[in-house]
Image (cartoon, helix red, strand yellow):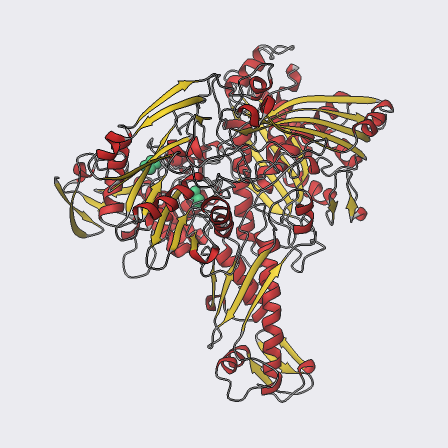
Amino acid sequence: MSATGIGAAVKRKEDFRFLTGRGNYTDDINQPGQTYAYILRSPHAHAKINGINTDAAKAAKGVLAVFTGEDMAGVGGIPCGWGVNNKDGSPMNEPPHPALAIGKVRHVGDQVAVVVAESYAKAKDAAELIEVDYTELPAVAHMEAALAAGAPLVHDDAAPGNLCYDWELGDEAEVDAEFKNAAHVVSIDLTNNRLVPNAMEPRAAIGDYNKGTGEYTLYTTSQNPHVIRLLMGAFVLQIPEHKLRVVAPDVGGGFGSKIYHYAEEAIVTWAAGKVRRPIKWVAERSESFLSDAHGRDHISHADLAIDADGKFLGLKVYTKANMGAYLSTFSTCVPTYLYATLLAGVYTTPKIYANVKAIFTNTVPVDAYRGAGRPEATYLLERLVSKAARQLGMDQVDIRRKNFIPADAFPYQTPVALQYDSGDYEATLKKAMELADWNGFPARKAEAAGRGKLRGIGISTYLEACGIAPSAVVGSLGARAGLFESANVRVHPTGSVTIYTGSHSHGQGHETTFAQLVSETLGIPIDNVTIDHGDTNRIAFGMGTYGSRSLAVGGEAIMKALGKVVDKASKIAAHLMEASPEDVEFKDGKFTVAGTDKEVDFGTVALTAYVPHNYPHETLEPGLEENAFYDPMNFTYPGGCHICEVEIDPDTGVTQVINMTAVDDVGRVINPMIVEGQIHGGLAQGIGQALLESCEYDESGQLISGSYMDYCMPRADNFPGFQATTESTLCAHNSLGVKGCGEVGAIGSPPAVINAVLDALADLGVEDISMPATPQKIWQAIQSASVPAAAE
Amino acid sequence: MPTVSMTVNGKQMSGDVESRTLLAQFIRETLDLTGTHIGCDTSQCGACVVHVNGDSVKSCTMLALEADGADVTTIEGLAQDGDDLHPMQEAFRDNHGLQCGFCTPGMVMSAIDLVKTNPNPSEHEIREWLEGNICRCTGYHNIVKSIAAGAAAMRGEKAAAE
Ligand code: FES
Ligand code: FES
């Protein structure tokens, strides 16, 4: 292993600029003549707009323009990227989503008008002069309310019953038959709590229009600038690709929330064409709470049929998924193809049925958030399996082992469409149990009891599907785009290299990991490599970064393009060494001819390609630059084991996480330092979901957790240090053997935490606790427990 | 509009501000020092931390006018000469204490102030100190490690920290 190649913990190339304040985030960019936009948002969850008077705002000092939905009526609505069909084959209900509200507002924060002014303060002041005549309508803030008979309709006739779709996977009757043979049936009802992604950089966008060339430019906080160009250009504003540049510069975290095409992007781009000056919009944090797509929000019931030996026979899952008021870009596929297809988990359950109803409510749209569907599936399964162990009097670990897909069973076809290519669940389990000292737990519990504390241990053995995705497969399931990736390798005359990748880094460290691939493959110093991304004018194409796809799809595209470079370079080297190309070997940056002492280095070949005086012109073009597109053969399947140990103070209900161990199979590790960092971040979000975070609406549809004063963001003192490590099998269908590490932490950990809390409370007879397991909930559960807490 | 003057990163700076202009806005918009970030509107996140007269301050909680005459250091002014990093910045790089980099300037500025008052903080003390700085990327694990290593380096124990 070279010091900067595959497997090395190379320090990040991007860190210097971030550490010295030289990052270039969207809000750091200013254009000559720039103006500022303030977006007026609905204070109501559901209301009819009778009229909007903008006269006073338009007349205010420094105001250039005020636009409302009527002004933008000619442009298309914000599109949804994935069509899902109902059980009966009919298409889902897909109501329009205007960039600025027309006729009605459907959630608190819905965009109503935009003020463009010489300064942000002037725009905001003028917005107060806009008079919107609303008639408030009854709202449905939660799914139960939306499904009640006679419930107010978010989209009137466009979505009767507030239903987006009623979808299923599997044959319910076939699974029912398994239940007839079951010795035991274990059932669970649970909620996957709604979360706000909260990347630390608020969303921002700058629109610009060049009258001279007719070109539009959008700077935006996006995980996928080409996808935004496609969606906004083709569907909303009808600007062809060659006249629209989208730049996503440094982006301060995304976690899914910056995948989607948002109305504000279309508004500033469109309005820049009207006012003929650049327009900047930056969200205030309270606006982010009201306008960034939220995550999770499922209510589920599940039944697991088990035979007398503890083997799983069949699983039935019924889930309601909140879509919010409008369909965000990937909202519809999250609770279906990224959720129900994961319900086999790491187990051999032979028959599975899932039914998912997607529901409209008067809340902010819900879409993918770190893990997207897989955390919901994992939470359901791992809670259910632990409950089954308790109900059957089996050991937590034994019941899992008994049902594991064995390491020699791959490729393994699940009953829910996916075919797993590799994995070894026993290996990750064993390592995690050792690291967490699972067997020493009873002694620690006894010691804690001596101090009056309730100690519990919880486990989750999970799997996820990422590296999204094979285009043909997702296309057949309703995706309205392909999910390949592109790469361009440009070798410069002196042998340095620029990689242009369609992946987008917003914390993942691509500038380092991808450079390691180049350093390894071409045998050149990592400092001679630059990774460029995030600009549709520089990068040929790209589908961006989400679903832990950057390395498994984007990295593979780079490897493919590097392969083409090496092929061509070998031919040039053969010419220089007067050898036949088949005899040329390339290793550690040097071309050699087997059996001779002839040698030429990569730099010489690069120079020859650009100064082709002595060159095989008959067979080769000059230059050394190659493109590749890579479409994966399958999803990748990271998995592993998370173990959490907690201590609860029965007097206050406060839970302290004592230990969090994660052993994950992420495939081949390119940079262990970065991989561990990704897992740490995921664990924090997973523990955050389990213990701290909850997005709450009151019955009228007001967001009551709309700031950092009310929404409990995890802080440093909420966590212990993490024990995170990897135990990998290689992905069987890509050249690097990589699987993906960005989401595993957030997927595997929530059930481990809740299982630990329930283990701590088990002796009191507490059987259920919902996320987030706050001190208040735990204290109440202890108070109403069937067995009183032992008196001191 | 009133004018404010202050020393920023060792240089005398002045500019016209509205009375409502926050120090964070003055630093970012008037002085174009965009390393100081704004992550919230409730003084919770700490992305905006700078040093005012040597102490860490959330620059979104202070009016630009209140800093008139003050000595302000931002992330851009930390490294002493040329391209070198301050030992705390170096420790963040060595320990992978940053991912997206958005919280990072505030974390580093805050950490240096911690070490000033507590040269050898325990893990527990570091975690408590960071109560006012939110990071969504790192899970804090490597930030805590970075600060412990940065503190050691600032004490002159660089080798021991690595
Ligand atoms: S911007 Fe100052 S604390 Fe968040
Ligand atoms: S590194 Fe992204 S918020 Fe801290």
B62 lies left or right of A502: left
Q: Is residue A790 above or below residue A593?
A: above
Figure quadrant, ligand 2? top left
Q: Is residue A594 above or below residue A624?
A: below
Is the N terminus of chain A in the top left, top right, bottom left or bottom right quadrant? bottom right
- Image point (77%, 32%), residue name: A352
Is the C terminus of chain A in the top left, top right, bottom left or bottom right quadrant? top right
**Do we see residue A2 in this rendering?**
no
- In this view of the protein, which residue sits in the foreground, A307 or B20? B20
- In this view of the protein, which residue sits in the foreground, A314 or A435? A314
Residue B7 position in % (x across, y down): 17, 48
Quadrant assignment, res B27: top left
Residue B162 position in % (x across, y down): 46, 53
Q: For the view shown, which residue lies furthest in the front direction? A: A74
Q: Is residue B150 above or below residue B18?
A: below
- In this view of the protein, which residue sits in the foreground, A292 or A642? A292
A571 lies left or right of B146: right
Residue A186 position in % (x across, y down): 75, 22
Quadrant assignment, res A322: top right
